Amino acid sequence: MNQHQLKKALSPLPLGDVRYFDSIGSTNNEALAWATSGAKDLSLVIADEQTAGRGRLDRKWFTPKGTALALSLILRPTAAEKLYLTRIVGLAALAATDSLRTRGLVSQIKWPNDVLLNGRKVAGILVESVWSGEEVDGLVIGIGMNVLKGAVPSDGLLFFPATSLEESLGPLVEREKVLHDILAGMIALRPHLSSDSFIASWEKALAFRGEQVQVEQGDGSLLTGKLLGLESDGSLRLTDEQSKSITVRFGDVRLRPRA
Ligand code: ATP
Ligand code: BTN
């Protein structure tokens, strides 16, 4: 990553400290360790390559050198924000979709933690916490975004098709600028975390809204229903064929359009 461009892109933002790596295992691991040892609010870990990037449940997230964004932002949640921790994944997803909208691209959020462009995964989000006793003391918001085509893993490695910004915008996308916009978006949305309009915006950005979907749960069982929207905590609201409402909570769940 071009260090000069990176510094320039980050300089207008009220970040804590920044750690940049040409190559790292996982930016989330680095950020979790840093959050445990006193990182300031809005400190950032950013890497040009990850060799052990993680998705949920330790699934692999691929970040080949020079092709993608891999960032982890540390938040020290305020007492008020601690009441809305389950909305943080929405904060990141909305900032990511906004950063694409600025570039003329309409993307959707595949609940709970993916961003789709043209129906393909362009970004993934992994939010993790650091605890102090019973209290959350730090949050790590990890975001991976496929910027250039080289970031997209081959089909054999994927359970869901993937894409990159390059496929829609051509090769001249500047990673540093996209990084700036995602961070600026999260910082701007943060004061609105508790508002109803936050949930409304998140809902509006959901993929498959009003459509029949399948949710595969950790035990392999399948739920099917129409995707209606979100509960106030960000859980997914569906309705089944008998119009009975179903709430899908965060956890080991995979959402798909109904086959
Ligand atoms: P999905 O709905 O895609 O099956 P999931 O929600 O079950 O995803 P996640 O933990 O969100 O799984 O994402 C991890 C998955 O993302 C990996 O198992 C892999 O298939 C896929 N993946 C890994 N790297 C990338 C990448 N750079 N771009 C797109 N997809 C990726
Ligand atoms: C997913 O779709 O499961 C989430 C993928 C999250 C990947 C990002 S890349 C930056 C940060 N570091 C990691 O190891 N994971 C997240």
Image (spheres, rainbow, N blue to C red):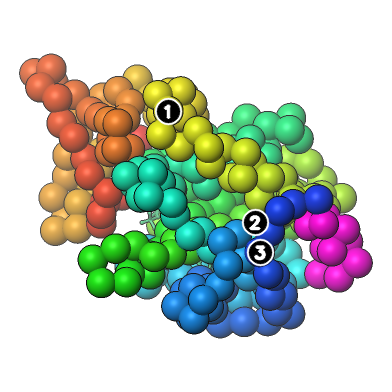
* Residue identified by numbered label 1: 195
Q: Is residue 56 above or below residue 100?
A: below
Q: 188 or 133, which lies in front?
A: 133
Q: Residues within 10 Å of mark 2 (few under 14, many from 20)?
A: many
Query: Can you name the residue that lies furthest to the top here?
Result: 243
- The amino acid on which the numbered mark 1 sits, given as a three-letter code, is Ser
Q: Residues within 10 Å of mark 1 (few under 14, many from 20)?
A: few
Residue 203 seen by the camera: no
Query: Can you name the residue that lies furthest to the front here?
Result: 79
Q: Secondary structure at mark 3?
A: loop
Residue positioned 14% across, 58% down in the render: 219
Residue positioned 73% across, 64% down in the render: 67
Q: Residues within 10 Å of mark 3 (few under 14, many from 20)?
A: some
* Residue identified by numbered label 3: 16
The alpha-carbon separation of the residues under discs 2 and 3 comes to: 25 Å
Q: Earlier in the sequence, mark 1 or mark 2?
A: 2
- The amino acid on which the numbered mark 2 sits, given as a three-letter code, is Asn
**Image location (x, y in percent) of residue 212:** 29, 27
The alpha-carbon separation of the residues under discs 1 and 2 comes to: 30 Å
The alpha-carbon separation of the residues under discs 1 and 3 comes to: 25 Å
Q: Is residue 67 above or below residue 31?
A: above
Residue span colored magenta: 1-11
Q: Quadrant of the N terminus?
A: bottom right
Residue 159 seen by the camera: yes
* Residue identified by numbered label 2: 146
Q: Earlier in the sequence, mark 1 or mark 3?
A: 3
Q: Earlier in the sequence, mark 2 or mark 3?
A: 3
**Image location (x, y in percent) of residue 34:** 53, 78
Q: Secondary structure at mark 1?
A: loop
